[in-house]
Amino acid sequence: MHFLVTGGAGFIGSHLCEKLIHLGHRVTCVDNFNAYYDPSIKRHNIRQLVKQPQFRLIDGDILRWRRMRDLFFDEIPDAVIHLAARAGVRPSIKNPRLYQKVNIEGTLRLLELARTANVSKFIMASSSSVYGNNKKIPFSEDDNVDFPISPYAATKKACELLGYTYHSLYQLPVTCLRFFTVYGPRQRPDMAIHKFTRCIVEGRPIPLFGDGNSRRDYTYITDIVDGILKAIEKCEQYHIYNLGESQTTILSRLIALLEEAVGKPAKIQWLPSQPGDVAVTYADISKSKNELGYYPKVPVKKGIPQFVSWYLEELSGGTGR
C-alpha cells in the first residue's frame, strides 16, 4: 500500500513511517519542519528513512493547497495518516488563532483532498485532551466531550466533527485516534518525561506545576504505533478509539521512576497549576480491544528505563537530543 503520512518526521510519525517501510509499504511523508522545536531534531528522526527507496519526503505545509492537491493527484495514496498538528495545551492558549488555522483548517483541506481523490482510508490523530476535566474515569469514547479547557483540545474535537461530516456526506471512511500521553524514544523535548529526564541528568530543578498529585495515562510509542496499524486495517465507516495504556501514574511516582533510571535524585521547583492542565487522564480501551485487537504491552515501569536508556545513548553520541 501507499501511505501519505502528515507530520511524518515527528515523534509518532517517524516511528510509524519506519514500521510501514519495514512492513513493505511505500510512504510519502509531509512535514514542514516548523520551529515549534528545533527542526534538526526531526531531520535526525528520519535520517535513516530518507535512504530508503520506498520513502519519499515532501518538505511542505498542509496549508499550501496547490502543492497538496498536486501531491494527492500525482499518485493517489491508498490511505492518509494525518498526524500533523500544532501541539501543546499551554502554547495554544497563547496563540489560539494559529492552532485554529493549522489544526482545523489543515484537517479540513486534507479531508477535502481525500474526498476528491477517492482515498479509501483516512486516519487522524486526536487527543485525550478532548475529555477536559471529565469527572468520570476511565474516559470512554461515549463520554460527553463538549467541554474542552484549551484551544488545542477544542481544535481536536472540531477535527473529529469534521471527520464525521465527511463520512456522513461522502462516505469517506474516517477513524479518529485519541492518544493518551505518548512517550518513548524521540519524544518531543518539551514533553514532561523528556524535559524531566534532561533536568535530572543536568542537575537542574524540574518545574512541577500543581501539587504533584496529577495522574496521566502514559502510553509507550510502540503500543501507539501498533494501535495505529490496527486502526488502518479496520478503518471503515466512522469510528473513534482511545489508544492508551489504561493505567494511571501519579506525577510523584513518575519522578521516582526517572530518578531510578537515571541514577540521580531530582531537584524540584514547585509552581502554581497552569490553565488548561487537567487533573487526570485515564483511557477506557475496551472498545479498542474488542474492535481493533489493541492490547498495550509496555507498562510505564518498563517504558521509562527504555526511554532513559535512549536519551543517555543520544547524549553520549553528541546529538544532545
Image (cartoon, helix red, strand yellow):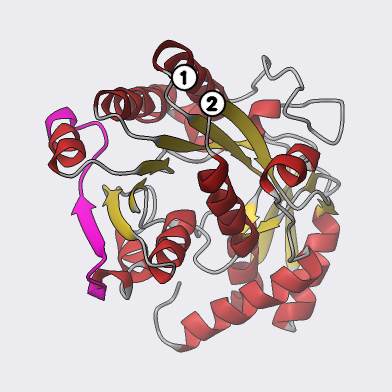
In the rendered view, would you say 250 is above or below 140?
below
Most foreground residue, 189 or 73: 73
Q: Residue at x 49, y 66 (%)?
A: 186
Image position of 104 (left or right of 43): right
Q: Residue at x 29, y 29 (%)?
A: 118
Most foreground residue, 104 or 189: 104
Does the magenta-highlighted stretch encompass residue 230? no
Residue under label 2: 237
Q: Which residues are magenta?
A: 51-66
Q: Residue at x 44, y 67 (%)?
A: 23
Amino acid type shown at disc 1: His
Q: Pinpoint residue 70: horizontal percent, then vertical percent.
A: 12, 36
Residue under label 1: 167
Q: Pinpoint residue 155: horizontal percent, then vertical percent.
A: 50, 24
Does the magenta-highlighted stretch encompass residue 64? yes
Most foreground residue, 239 or 9: 239
| Within-10-Å neighbours for mark 1: few <14, some 14–19, many 20+ | many
